[in-house]
Amino acid sequence: MPSILSIHGGPHTDYGHAFMHEFQLFAARGYGVCYSNPRGSAGYGQAWVDDIHGRWGGPDADDLLNFFDRCLEAHPRLDGNRSAVMGGSYGGFMTNWITGHTTRFQAAITDRSICNLLSFGGTSDIGLRFWEDELGLNFHRRADALRLWDMSPLQYVENVKTPTLIVHSVLDHRCPIEQAEQWYAALTLHGVPVRFVRFPEENHELSRAGRPDRRIKRLEEYLGWLEEWL
């Protein structure tokens, strides 16, 4: 059974014990969906939330990959050689980060993602404060710029080999579409198989509150990419 590692956004949100139609759709199509609440997630106390402050792409990435390994061990039906990583918002950041640091996944889907922490600071509707809150850094300070670049997936794009579907909404002001455009351009320049799907008139909430036909189209794109590469 092909397997999916799904990463939630936030990062300070969490997956819970509730119906999620996307996971049910993937399962109905024969995919095993693995999802967890790595460090930074809500639900396990403030210390767990704070443990990634200033170090996105560190312990959170370790937690996710270690969790996926445990899933493969616990459920032998899951095929680690036919696996995909996906996520939206912070989950999209982490998808980009992971594919820049490992080639273990055969497909990636990055949705409303972040790839360049420096340009995000100057374009997002929360850019003035977000990196200060999350990382103790800010894009307008020279002393912080290199540290923000070190945590930007774009710095590691030369390592990416994973075929990647990029999904983004044109009116997304939380994670502006320029982030997707940079990731698409960089992957294209490095010869990585990539497809960029842009949704007009939609914002950061497409997957939850977008126009119904566009929400369906988004999921069709997901399934098409998984079927092509897994």
Image (tube, rainbow, N blue to C red):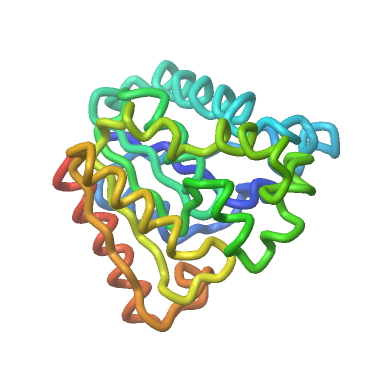
Q: Is residue 1 visible?
A: no
* Image location (x, y in percent) of residue 193: 18, 43
Residue at x 43%, y 61% (from the top left corner): 178
Residue closest to the far front: 142
* Image location (x, y in percent) of residue 218: 32, 66
Q: Is residue 67 visible?
A: yes
Residue at x 50%, y 71% (from the top left corner): 172
- Drawn side of residue 177 relative to residue 2, left or right: right
- Drawn side of residue 88 relative to residue 227, left or right: right
| In the depicted structure, whether residue 208 falls above or below residue 213 | above
Q: Quadrant of residue 51?
A: top right
Residue closest to the far top: 73
Residue closest to the far left: 228
Looking at the rendered structure, the number of numbered marks drawn on it comes to 0
| In the depicted structure, whether residue 106 falls above or below residue 73 | below
- Drawn side of residue 30 relative to residue 211, left or right: left
The quadrant of the picture occupied by the C terminus is: top left
- Which is nearer the eye, 58 or 129? 129
| In the depicted structure, whether residue 155 falls above or below residue 195 | above
The quadrant of the picture occupied by the N terminus is: top left
| In the depicted structure, whether residue 182 falls above or below residue 67 | below
* Image location (x, y in percent) of residue 142: 69, 40
Q: Quadrant of residue 141?
A: top right
Residue at x 28%, y 45% (from the top left corner): 164
* Image location (x, y in percent) of residue 121: 63, 55
- Which is nearer the eye, 2 or 105? 105
